[in-house]
Amino acid sequence: MSSLAKTLYKIKRFGNSLFTKDCVSCGKAVRGSCLCEKCIEKSSPSGNYRNGFACAFYYEGPAKDALLRFKFGGDYEFCFDTFCDWLLSAYEKLDEHDFDAVVPVPAFGCKNTRLSELAEKFSLMADIPFHPEYLRKIRRTEKQHKLSASERRVNLIGAFEAESSVSGKKILLVDDIFTTGSTAAECANALYDKDAEKICVITLFKTRYDA
């Protein structure tokens, strides 16, 4: 990404911060964030940052409301900048910051997903090259949230394929939510199969998943 693109994005973000909107969780007037200060305080920052993984919040409370509004409601643009900031906060928790590429978890048959757009803007702010083409999903799978932990692992086996150009590269994989780790593991396996040097993962949220 060029320095001009980064400057233009910062100008856009500043412009958005001048307008008052409603907190996506409680409805209170806010500027520059999709959650008000009280709702952010009610959200639980995740302490899970080790072994190459980090995330911003647990998937509960107001933070969960924000993701649901981002993915399924009409607040995609409103939540976008806030989520970019949260990805940056997750990234800062990692011990490793030397990456050759940001790669979003891909969807089957769809390149321009909301996650890929978010990962692209995160890469811009983190000054890491964006390479969504490094990883693709090669078959359709069942929705993960409908499955048990063991079913999730089986569901994704062989679902991803990496490009040979990842060989020797350090990859930062980006997803929206970490539950059992099955998606991240299968993506990492595909990248390692093509001789990627190292894979780290950041997500917006992590569930408190015990199954």
Image (tube, rainbow, N blue to C red):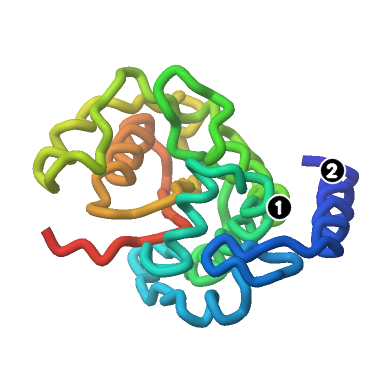
Q: Which corner quadrant holds the C terminus?
A: bottom left
Question: Which residue is the site of mark 2?
Answer: 5
Amino acid under disc 1? Asp
- 71 or 5, which is in the foreground? 71
Q: Secondary structure at mark 2?
A: helix
**Quarter-of-image position of residue 140:** top left
Question: What percent of the width, then of the height, locates residue 80?
Answer: 64, 51
Q: Which mark is residue 119?
A: none
Between 89 and 197, the one nearer to me in the picture: 89
The residue shown at (50%, 71%) is: 93
Judge whether 145 appears above or below 201 on screen: above
Whole-angstrom CA distance, mark 2 to mark 1, is: 12 Å
Residue 74 is at least partly visible in this image: yes
Where, quadrant-wise, is the N terminus in this rendering? top right
Q: Residue at x 58, y 27 (%)?
A: 112
Residue 83 lies in quadrant = bottom right
Percent across and percent down for residue 27 are: 60, 66
Q: Position of residue 25 (x, y in %)?
A: 52, 65
| Tag 1 residue | 127
At mark 1, the secondary structure is loop
Q: Earlier along the polypeptide chain: callout 2 or callout 1?
A: 2
Please identify, in this view, whether the residue under mark 2 or under mark 1 is nearer the observer.
2
